[in-house]
Image: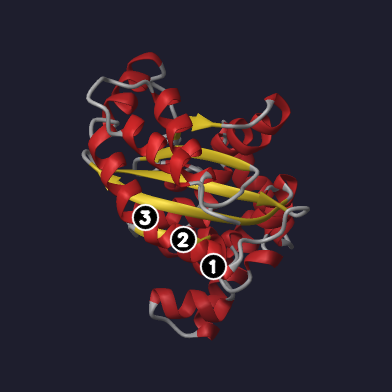
């Protein structure tokens, strides 16, 4: 794909103009800028702050697509999303989903129960921390029909990443105000959800952490490395979790997890 320099410079100048821009105008400006470099099927921008439900700043989805990619995602699956984990670390920069995904992501309950519904071949995100412990993530997505981004395309996106970061830092530096405004109108918004999910169960803090990692797609070996314990210890914890919750599969575990978040 040839770079459309005229469109690139026009979009960049609009994003850096002095006047105030709405979230929608900013989002569309980024779409115009990035489509001058590569093609993609969808673009979405989320703001993440801790375990609070992410705020959708902008997206290009149609109504039915919006339900899957945004509305359903915000109900709880975001907590198991590799992009959410990277945003809350935070882990700034540009990342492919496959670079962030756990070792058994494509066999995880998150993937089977939610991510498969998106029909994506690849997702690339620009991760930009801003004020108030918020990270803005600009995601570019390609469907299975379009296929993954080629190495040359990813290299172009990597080169434009400093410009994207600079504009987001400038334009959305006060995006934490979005969260405060929402809390005023939705005081029961999901907050502290991972620990709240198992508040009525006799689970230890370590067991709750293991549940999160299992559902994200980490193997027992990966969990052991992350938590600094042996693989055997992780397996013992997993057996205890299943016994306490009276379940026998990860499918049941995922169902309990999502049900508890909606209560």
Q: Secondary structure at mark 3?
A: helix
Q: Secondary structure at mark 1?
A: helix
Q: Quadrant of the C terminus?
A: top right
Nearest the viewer among 54 and 40 is 40
Residue 19 against residue 55 in the figure, above or below: above
> Which of the labelled discs sits on residue 156, or is there none?
2
Which label's residue is closer to the chain start, 3 or 1?
A: 1
The outermost residue toward the right is 145
C-beta proximity under 8 Å, tags 3 and 1: no
| Residue that label 3 marks | 161
C-beta proximity under 8 Å, tags 2 and 3: no
CA separation, marks 2 and 3?
Answer: 9 Å
Q: Position of residue 63 (x, y in %)?
A: 69, 24
Q: Position of residue 28 (x, y in %)?
A: 48, 30
Q: Residues within 10 Å of mark 2 (few under 14, many from 20)?
A: some
| Residue that label 1 marks | 152
Q: Which mark is nearer the camera, 2 or 3?
A: 2
235 displayed left or right of 158: right
> Which of the labelled discs sits on residue 207, or is there none?
none
Nearest the viewer among 98 and 73 is 98
Q: Secondary structure at mark 2?
A: helix
C-beta proximity under 8 Å, tags 1 and 2: yes
Q: Position of residue 106 (x, y in %)?
A: 68, 65
Q: Which mark is nearer the camera, 3 or 1?
A: 1
Residue 20 against residue 164 in the figure, above or below: above
């Amino acid at each position: 794909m040839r770079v459309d320099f005229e469109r690139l410079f026009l979009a960049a100048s609009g994003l850096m103009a002095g006047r105030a821009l709405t979230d929608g105008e900013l989002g569309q400006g980024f779409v115009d800028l990035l489509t001058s470099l590569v093609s993609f099927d969808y673009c979405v921008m989320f703001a993440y702050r801790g375990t609070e439900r992410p705020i959708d700043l902008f997206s290009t989805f149609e109504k039915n697509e919006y339900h899957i990619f945004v509305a359903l995602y915000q109900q709880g699956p975001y907590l198991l999303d590799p992009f959410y984990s990277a945003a809350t670390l935070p882990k700034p920069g540009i990342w492919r989903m496959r670079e962030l995904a756990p070792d058994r992501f494509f066999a995880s309950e998150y993937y089977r129960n939610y991510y498969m519904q998106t029909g994506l071949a690849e997702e690339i995100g620009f991760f930009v921390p801003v004020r108030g412990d918020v990270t803005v993530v600009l995601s570019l997505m390609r469907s299975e029909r379009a296929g993954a981004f080629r190495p040359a395309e990813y290299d172009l996106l990597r080169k434009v990443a400093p410009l994207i970061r600079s504009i987001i830092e400038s334009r959305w530096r006060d995006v934490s105000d979005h969260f405060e405004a929402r809390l005023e109108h939705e005081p029961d918004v999901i907050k502290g959800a991972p620990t709240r999910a198992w508040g009525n169960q006799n689970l230890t803090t370590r067991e709750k952490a293991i549940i999160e990692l299992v559902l994200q797609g980490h193997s027992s070996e990966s969990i052991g490395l992350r938590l600094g314990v042996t693989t055997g210890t992780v397996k013992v914890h997993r057996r205890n979790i299943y016994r306490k919750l009276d379940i026998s599969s990860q499918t049941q575990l995922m169902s309990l997890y999502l049900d508890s978040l909606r209560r």
